[in-house]
């Protein structure tokens, strides 16, 4: 069983649920095992869901809400007309095992080539030499 919601949590969840559409519909057959399973799957996926009940009997809707919350360890957020809002917090995810670091393969280093000062200066001047390009004329 989950801990009851505080008024501030309930207010926040009502605001979040306002824009939601009903995910699960309970028809004339009532609260069957298939419906309970579907509500459970939806709570795992969304945490906060709306459920629409086709019954006109208010007492029966309250019984449905109570049994959903009791069986699925959820909290009732709101019951307006034929719409129930149910919330169940997902458990925190289990820590994943650490991934071993991939190491780069060790390569054999080439011996450093020695350059004479004359070659170094020639290489620098070639790298910094500006190339003039002809201008386009139309």
Image (tube, helix red, strand yellow):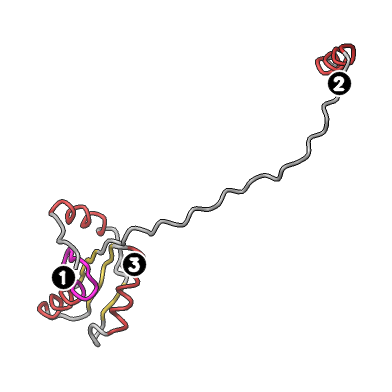
Answer with the quarter of the image where residue 110 lies.
Answer: top right
| Quarter of the figure that contains the N terminus | bottom left
| Quarter of the figure that contains the C terminus | top right
Q: Which residue is mark 3?
A: 44
Mark 2 vs mark 3: which is more N-terminal? 3
Relative to 43, is 71 on the left or the right? Answer: left
Real-space Cα separation, disc 3 to disc 1, in angstroms: 25 Å
Residue at 75% from the left image edge and 41% from the top image edge: 107
Q: Is residue 116 above or below residue 94?
A: above
Label 2 secondary element: loop
Q: Relative to the observer, which residue lies in front, 45 or 24?
A: 45
Magenta range: 68-79
Residue 118 in picture, x, y percent from top left: 89, 11
Residue 32 in picture, x, y percent from top left: 26, 85
Real-space Cα separation, disc 2 to disc 3, in angstroms: 66 Å
Residue at 25% from the left image edge and 59% from the top image edge: 17
Q: Is residue 109 above or below residue 40?
A: above
Relative to 21, is 12 on the left or the right? Answer: left
Q: Which residue is mark 2?
A: 114
Real-space Cα separation, disc 2 to disc 1, in angstroms: 87 Å
Q: Relative to the observer, which residue lies in front, 42 or 20?
A: 42
Residue 125 in picture, x, y percent from top left: 84, 13
Mark nearest the camera among 2 and 3 is 2
In magenta stretch: residue 75: yes
Q: Which residue is mark 1?
A: 81
Please rate how many residues cluster around mark 1, counting C-alpha atoms within 10 Å: few if below 14, some from 14 to 19, many from 20. few
Q: Relative to the observer, which residue lies in front, 75 or 1?
A: 1
Residue at 29% from the left image edge and 69% from the top image edge: 22
In magenta stretch: residue 106: no
Please rate how many residues cluster around mark 3, counting C-alpha atoms within 10 Å: few if below 14, some from 14 to 19, many from 20. some
Mark 2 vs mark 1: which is more N-terminal? 1
């Amino acid at each position: 069983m989950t801990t009851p919601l505080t008024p501030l949590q309930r207010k926040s969840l009502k605001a979040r649920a306002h824009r939601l559409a009903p995910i699960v519909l309970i028809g004339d057959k009532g609260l069957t095992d298939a419906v309970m399973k579907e509500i459970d799957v939806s709570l795992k996926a969304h945490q906060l869901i709306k459920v629409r009940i086709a019954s006109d009997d208010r007492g029966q809707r309250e019984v449905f809400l109570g049994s959903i919350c009791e069986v699925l360890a959820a909290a009732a957020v709101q019951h307006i007309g034929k719409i129930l809002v149910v919330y169940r917090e997902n458990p925190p995810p289990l820590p994943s095992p650490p991934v071993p670091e991939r190491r780069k393969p060790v390569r054999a280093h080439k011996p450093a080539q020695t350059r004479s000062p004359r070659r170094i200066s020639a290489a620098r001047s070639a790298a910094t030499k500006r190339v003039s390009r002809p201008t386009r004329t139309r």
